[in-house]
Every structure is written in C-alpha cells, then in structure tokens.
Image (cartoon, grey):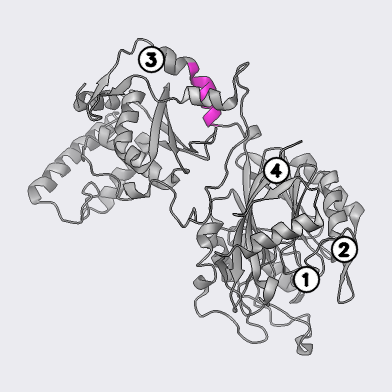
Amino acid sequence: MAKQDIEALAKGGDPAAIAFALNQGLRSKGVTATALRKDRCLHILLDGASVPAQQACVDYIRDRLHSLGVRSIPTVKVYGRQTDQPLPAWTEEFELRADAWAKLRSIWAQPQKNPLNSSNQPPTAAKSNTKWLFLCVGTAGFLIGTGTVFVRSSQQYSRFAPISSLTQNRAEQPALFETPFIQPAPPTRPRSGETLGEMVSAQFSPPESFSKNPDGQALELQPKKDKKAHFAGSFMTASAAVAPSAAATSITIKAVGDIIPGSNYPYSKLPKNERVLFQSVRGYLQGADLLFGNFESTLTNYPYSAKDTSTGRSFAFRTPPKYAGLLKSVGFDVLSVANNHSGDFFERGFEDTFNNIEKAGMKAVGKKGKILYMTVKGVPVAFIGFSNYDYHNSILDMPAAKKLVAEARKNAKIVAISVHAGAEGTGAMRVRNQQESFYGENRGNMVLFSRTMIDAGADLILGHGPHVPRAVELYKGKLIAYSLGNFLGYRSLSTVAELGYSLILQVELNAEGDFVSGKIVPVHLDGQGIPYIDQSFRSVQLIRNLTQSDFPKTPLKIERNGKIVKKPQS
C-alpha cells in the first residue's frame, strides 16, 4: 500500500496506521510506538531501551497527529515504558482538538513567526501566503466542528521536541547510572496461567496489520478481518494495564538531608549567585513524585537570635525569605523544619520559615501535633516531622508519637516520617539500638523509634541530623534511612572527611507503602558546601559498608552503582 494511502487511514483514526506514521520518526531514535483505540480515545504506548523522554515524545506525537490531519479522535493518552519493564513509567493525556485550538491562538499571537516552518530561514512570500491561506481554511474547519487544522508540514516536526531528544536526556538520566527502576504494582490480575508481563506484551504486541517488504522500505497493508477482535476484544484489559488505578500506583520519593543555602547572620555569608548552589545536582533531583529535604536554617528577616553565637559552639542560621523560591524552582515539594535550628530566631523565625515555605508553593512539616496530608498520583500520603525537642513532635515521647502515626494511618495509604535526631559527626556514623547523646542532649534511640513507628503504621523513615550518612535497614518491608547526611551547607557546614559525603536517596513504594526498590545517587560537597555528583561513588561504598556492619541480616542489597534491591527470599 502506498504511503499516502496509509496516511489517509491514519487521518481517519486507524490506530495501526497512526503507529506506523509515528514510527517513521521514532524508531531511528530507539523508540517504538504501538497504538490502540477505544471509542474516542487513542492510546499510544512507547517502548525504548531506556524510558522515553516524556516531554519530547508527547510534543512529537502531538505535532505528528496534527500534521497527519487526525480529526476523529479528540483524546490521546501516551504511555512511556522501558522495554524490559511490564508497565509504563509515565503517562500523559491531552486533548487533540483543544491542543489544535491552542496552537492556532499561539500562531495568531505571534504572526511574525511561523511555527510550521522548522528551519530558521524565513519562507518566501509565496510559501508564506500559501500557508496562511491553508491556515485560514483550517481555522474555518475548526469552527464548523472538524476540530483540526488542515495544514501539512511534511517532515517538519515540533520545534519544541527535536527528534534527537526522544530518549531521556543526561540531566534527567545520568550516564553513570542505570535507568531508574520504575515498575508500578500490577493493577489487574492476569488470566489464569498467564503472567502480568505476558498479558501486557500480548495487548501491546506490534500490530499485525503491517509488514515490511524485504527492502525494509515499502509497506503493505494486510487483511484486517481480525482487527476488531485484536484491538477491541482485548482493550479493556490492556487499558487497565497501562493506566493503573490509584489503588495500584507506585510512588517514587527522592530525599536529601540537611540544607542551608547560606546565612546572613551575624554577617552575610550568601553566594553572589544563588543559582550555583544546586546547579550540578538539579537534574538529578527531578523525576520523582515527591522531593523531600530537611531545611536546617530559617527563612526570616527577624533581627534577633535566640542563640549566643559568640562562644563558637553555637550557630544561628538565617536565610533570606526569597530563597524559598529557589528551593521551589529546584523541585522540592516537602521540607522539614523540625530540627535544632528551626528556633534560631525565636518562635517568630519559626513561623516565618513555615509560612514562607508554604507561600512558595511547597509544604512544611514539623509543627507539634500536626500531620501533613497530600495526594500523590491519587494515593493519600501523610508526612510527619519529628526531632528530639519537645517543641516539635518529639521522638522522646513515644506514646504521643505512636498516637500521631496511628491517626495518620487512618487517613492515608502511605505514612512517611522525617526525623532529626542522633549524635553528630564522623564519630557518629554507626547505628546502635541505644540512646545517643550530643553535648549533653538526649538525641534519642533512632533504631527503637524507627521500628516502633513502623509497628504503629509508618511506611518510610527518613533520618537526618548526624551530618554524615548512615546505614539503611528494611524492617517488616519498610525502609529506614538512618541519616541522609549533609546536602547543602554553603559556608556553614563542615565538609571534612565523611561530613562531605552526601546522597540523593530514591525510593519506590507500592500503594501499601512497602519498599519496592531504591537508589543512592552519590553526591560530594566541595569546600564551600556546594553539592556535586560524585563519580567516585564514595557515599555508596560508605553506606554499603555501614549497612553490612550495623544490620547484617537486613534483607537489602546495595549494588556498586547505588541500586538498592531486596534480597531474594531463601
């Protein structure tokens, strides 16, 4: 069948023809598209050796459908999947007709620029007039209900989505790491005797209605007598597989330790350009459903400190409130303010910090008796901030802590705990099931507290405070990270020896809060306390050794590249 005939089928909404048209640009970049249609929705599954880049692929598909003149399908759902994984890592839905209307408005708003011309060279007057004539015709077609733009721009793909970017870029997926493991929990049961992977593969096998000629160029359309049964008969099961219900969704959380972007008290120690603080690690913080950090400073302009900093053993940190916007731009969703610096500027500074975090569009945890509730991918999640001080939720008051966790358990599917406790420094890297002290303060028993909270209903423990990384433990299927170390301490935190070892912890939980997989992204702080990706993997090796020493029986394995997996059950 000629190419124009296949494009005519695609224009009419034939899913196999649409997949073929998309694959003309996708396959050379290592991505393969398969399409299914159910009523007025087109579902497109993208497979790649690594997870296809979401934004670039969606932009390309959107523009390709417009160039094909597809007008009978109002809704498109796109799914990106790593080939060796049974379920997609991401999904995105868009309205094709509404999108066409938005594109028209964008063209009208900038008449001097023609987005249909992918080159930087200005078109000739004749070509420009011709395109504007077709644009007007397309507009008329849209207004009378066709809902599409009759403008063809052959081989001129999206200016927003160059074909070269259709796999994850290096900022999102570093070369030194393997593709992050993303595998949502099974949303539906396979048929008897059939694995979930076989079920999904069967539903999304390449359409049999196309076959290549020996030269690999021409394509012939095969008889479609079984096409209806092939697509419609199996679609409901396949649709459930690629669009997991909220009850079966997995949640990916990234977490980092102590953050001090700089202080202006008692004198200014702020960077000239605050954007350099996260410049090296910004891309590695992306890609999670929720990004957490411990903010160990204050966001206030209040002039009076509660601490006497003249002794050299007491420190007060005050960061200008505008830095909340920087933290938001990096991608933080939740910040803990339950730590030993939240009261550096009295209660006024604490309230200012909390409020400035919230005003910037993030959430803060750490107020006494308070639980943060949020919905992540349709799953109710609770976050609670603890420290060893009684003006926060205190780990020293175990009955109150258990009560708070039990309350959160009633209202959320996943309960995450942030806890700032434990002794500090390179001499405090080992974890013991005993009370820890620092400068005479009772810093609590982190092992007893963490396990007790999991027994009470918590699903994830994120520890910080010792300023060094510590071991991780899997307790009753729940992950405990005993310390995430320092993450950013511009001219404020020591980076000597292991104090400069840092990490981005990536954790995947199923909808019940059970640990599925994880990863340690190694980070190292320079002399000014700015984080950089560590090509030497020092924190990975450190946490591997500490975990083997402190929790030799824990059913976790930390691989050399930082991947955290559950040990096979014997």
SS label for mark 4: strand
Say which mark, if any, is on residue 227: 3
Mark 4 packing: few (<14 Cα in 10 Å), some, or many (20+)? some
Range of magenta residues: 234-243
**Residue type (three-letter) at the residue carrying disc 3:** Lys
Between 403 and 118, the one nearer to me in the picture: 118
Asked if the residue at tag 2 contacts the one at tag 3, i.e. Cβ–Cβ closer than 8 Å, the answer is no
**Residue type (three-letter) at the residue carrying disc 4:** Lys
Mark 1 packing: few (<14 Cα in 10 Å), some, or many (20+)? some
- Give the left or right position of residue 451, taking residue 24 as reference: right
**Label 4, label 1: how far apart the Cα atoms are:** 34 Å
- Give the left or right position of residue 123, taking residue 100 as reference: left
SS label for mark 1: loop
Q: Earlier in the sequence, mark 4 or mark 3?
A: 3
SS label for mark 2: strand
Asked if the residue at tag 3 contacts the one at tag 1, i.e. Cβ–Cβ closer than 8 Å, the answer is no
**Label 1, label 2: how far apart the Cα atoms are:** 14 Å
